[in-house]
């Protein structure tokens, strides 16, 4: 890097400009990544944090992709899952977004209907009794309610039995927990006389093998996903997350193109110097190593700066913007930007191999 | 070691036909001496220099340094590059200094190209800069130097690796007569002190008083000697 480092110092204006561009793109990608993770959490945390391994859906048409909005399961399907090999527990869980009205305000919430003695509430909280509602911290703050207050949920008055200090969201709405019978009323999903209970999914706990899932799905008419995979069954999450990930991919690709374009212009402007270096005895390997090292240095500095600014910015804005700052939202996009940027740079720098040292004999 | 150009022929493709730039040319430059190669534009002198430097492979013939064959029609690019690094110094028509390096670093670069620490050549680099009268400018970049000063640094750079062969291409083309003569005198003196076989391509015979021998090229062939001070 003898020449590369001195070029960086000598052409500091050009490289500073490039650093700013890489830093800004990295900031955008890293912040968008944090925002994607934050929005995903706000959209799915109540599902992904469920203390279960699988969720069994029953779609109106066999073969349809599992979807929380369209799925309806019955007691018979829960019983089929309870009897499956390796299953420790199978519970009905209702999911329905409803209009909640407190004395102070009105907001949308998602009501999770749970069976008596359910273990599906976070923080080992007990299942709500009939006529009561357990609310998450987000719902309590949004509706300005506390334990003992009355909350109208879908036109059905319930008493607030407990406020859980947890962050539980579904499709960007805070979650409240009600008894399954209340949920059926609120969600307008009253079972038919011979149907037993109905809900949205069967929540399955235990060491359930893939074979068991296939057999039980076939027998019970369900479609079962791992709890993490179940995020895809939240329709708003799939489209939102897909859009944000596409934006990130475009930004990373643009970054690679920008880096490639910069080093293309830079390499072309150095044609004369490279020819002289070859004429003086610099091997192609030496020149490639020097130039790629220079590109890597610029990328690492720019990406580090951008990632740092994004991480600090996202952390400071965490109270007002739904962001999550983890190694996945910072180091992963940073690594992708460095890797793809380096690919762009290498493609640009590779033309060094074609430069004829004979050019050095020409006057400049 | 002497530089031997043995039966060198260089043919370029030229549209559908070919152009013979150098034809069956023999030339020996003894070590420690300077031979000037004169000739009109298109006579083939720069092509011959390119062959001698391994920048162009000859169509036929060999370039030897002492008894070692340095370049021949089958020489690989990597082998030619290594030979230039180890055995040949080149002074280009324009100084061709690297804009980001100081005068001292232009010389220290040679050590880096060889895989050594640049500082390992510092003493020799400073000594060479002193010999070309550039001691006071060791830490200046090319943009801070005059044309003559840049050419002096280029000469020192060509000699930093103690080359057995020094090849100089039109070193005075951008200089006035007085400075051109000084540069040729400097090259001749240093070549003698460092025992390098030196071949200088020039268009200006009036600056060549100090060289040992002058030969002229015309249409790719050699016309021997305006003067032969070393008797070869």
Image (cartoon, coloured by chain):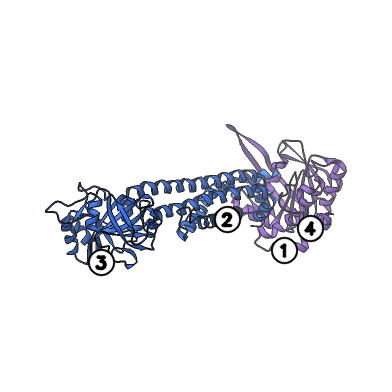
- Residue A345's label in the rendered image is none
Q: Nearer the viewer, residue A205 or A299?
A: A205
For the residue labelled by badge 1, is the local secondary structure a helix, a strand or a loop?
helix
In the image, residue B205 sits, relative to residue B33, either above or below, namely above
Asked whether residue B55 appears in the rendered view, the answer is no
Q: Are marks 4 and 3 on the same chain?
A: no
**Pointer 3 residue:** A206
Compared across the picture, whether A165 is left or right of B2 comes to left
Rounded to the nearest whole Å, what is the CA distance between mark 2 and mark 4?
54 Å
Image-quadrant location for residue B220: top right
- Residue A305's label in the rendered image is 2
Image-quadrant location for residue B22: top right
**Pointer 4 residue:** B195
Residue A149 location, x and y as percent?
Answer: 34, 58
- Residue B119's label in the rendered image is 1
Q: Residue sitting at 17 percent across and 52 percent down?
A: A191
Rounded to the nearest whole Å, what is the CA distance between mark 4 and mark 3?
87 Å
Between circles 2 and 4, the one closer to the viewer is 2
For the residue labelled by badge 3, is the local secondary structure a helix, a strand or a loop?
strand
């Amino acid at each position: 890097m003898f020449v590369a480092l001195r070029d960086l110092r000598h052409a500091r204006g050009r490289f500073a400009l490039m650093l700013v561009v890489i830093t800004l793109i990295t900031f955008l990608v890293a912040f968008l990544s944090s925002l994607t993770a934050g929005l995903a959490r706000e959209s799915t945390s109540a599902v992904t944090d469920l203390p279960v391994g699988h969720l069994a859906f029953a779609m109106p048409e066999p073969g349809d992709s599992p979807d929380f909005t369209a799925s309806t399961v019955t007691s018979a399907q829960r019983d089929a899952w309870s009897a499956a090999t390796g299953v420790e527990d199978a519970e009905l869980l209702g999911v329905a977004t409803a209009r909640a009205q407190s004395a102070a305000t009105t907001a949308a919430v998602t009501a999770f209907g749970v069976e008596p003695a359910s273990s599906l509430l976070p923080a080992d909280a007990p299942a709500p009794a009939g006529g009561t509602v357990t609310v998450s911290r987000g719902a309590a703050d949004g509706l300005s309610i506390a334990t003992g207050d009355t909350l109208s949920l879908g036109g059905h008055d319930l008493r607030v039995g407990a406020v859980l200090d947890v962050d539980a969201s579904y499709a960007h709405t805070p979650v409240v927990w009600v008894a399954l019978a209340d949920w059926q009323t609120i969600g307008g999903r009253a079972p038919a006389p011979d149907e037993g209970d109905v809900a949205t999914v069967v929540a399955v706990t235990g060491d359930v093998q893939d074979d068991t899932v296939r057999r039980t799905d076939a027998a019970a008419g369900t479609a079962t996903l791992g709890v993490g995979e179940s995020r895809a069954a939240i329709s708003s999450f799939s489209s939102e997350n897909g859009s944000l990930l596409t934006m990130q991919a475009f930004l990373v690709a643009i970054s690679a193109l920008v880096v490639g374009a910069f080093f293309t212009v830079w390499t072309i402007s150095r044609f004369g110097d490279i020819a002289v270096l070859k004429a003086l005895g610099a091997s192609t390997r030496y020149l490639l190593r020097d130039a790629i090292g220079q590109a890597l240095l610029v990328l690492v500095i720019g990406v580090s700066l951008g990632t740092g600014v994004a991480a600090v910015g996202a952390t400071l804005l965490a109270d007002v913007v739904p962001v999550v700052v983890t190694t996945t939202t910072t180091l992963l996009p940073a690594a992708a930007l460095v890797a793809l940027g380096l690919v762009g740079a290498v493609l640009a720098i590779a033309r060094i191999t074609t430069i004829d040292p004979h050019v050095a004999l020409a006057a400049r | 070691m002497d530089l031997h150009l043995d039966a060198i022929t260089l043919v370029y493709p030229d549209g559908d036909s070919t152009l013979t730039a150098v034809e069956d040319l023999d030339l020996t430059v003894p070590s420690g001496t300077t031979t000037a190669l004169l000739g009109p534009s298109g006579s083939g002198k720069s092509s011959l220099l390119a062959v001698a430097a391994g920048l162009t492979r000859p169509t036929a013939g060999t370039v030897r340094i002492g008894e070692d064959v340095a370049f021949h029609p089958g020489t690989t690019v990597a082998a030619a590059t290594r030979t230039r690094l180890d055995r040949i110094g080149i002074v280009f028509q324009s100084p061709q200094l690297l804009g980001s390096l100081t005068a001292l670093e232009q010389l220290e670069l040679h050590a880096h190209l060889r895989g050594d620490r640049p500082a390992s050549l510092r003493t020799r680099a400073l000594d060479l800069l002193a010999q070309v009268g550039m001691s006071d400018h060791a830490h200046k970049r090319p943009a801070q130097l005059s044309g003559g000063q840049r050419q002096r640094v280029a000469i020192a750079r060509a000699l930093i690796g103690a080359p057995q062969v020094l090849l100089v291409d039109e070193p005075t083309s951008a200089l006035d007569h007085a400075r051109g003569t000084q540069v040729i005198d400097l090259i001749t003196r240093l070549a003698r002190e460092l025992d390098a076989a030196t071949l200088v391509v020039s268009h200006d015979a009036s600056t060549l008083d100090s060289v040992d021998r002058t030969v002229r090229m015309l249409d790719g062939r050699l016309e021997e000697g305006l003067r032969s001070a070393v008797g070869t």
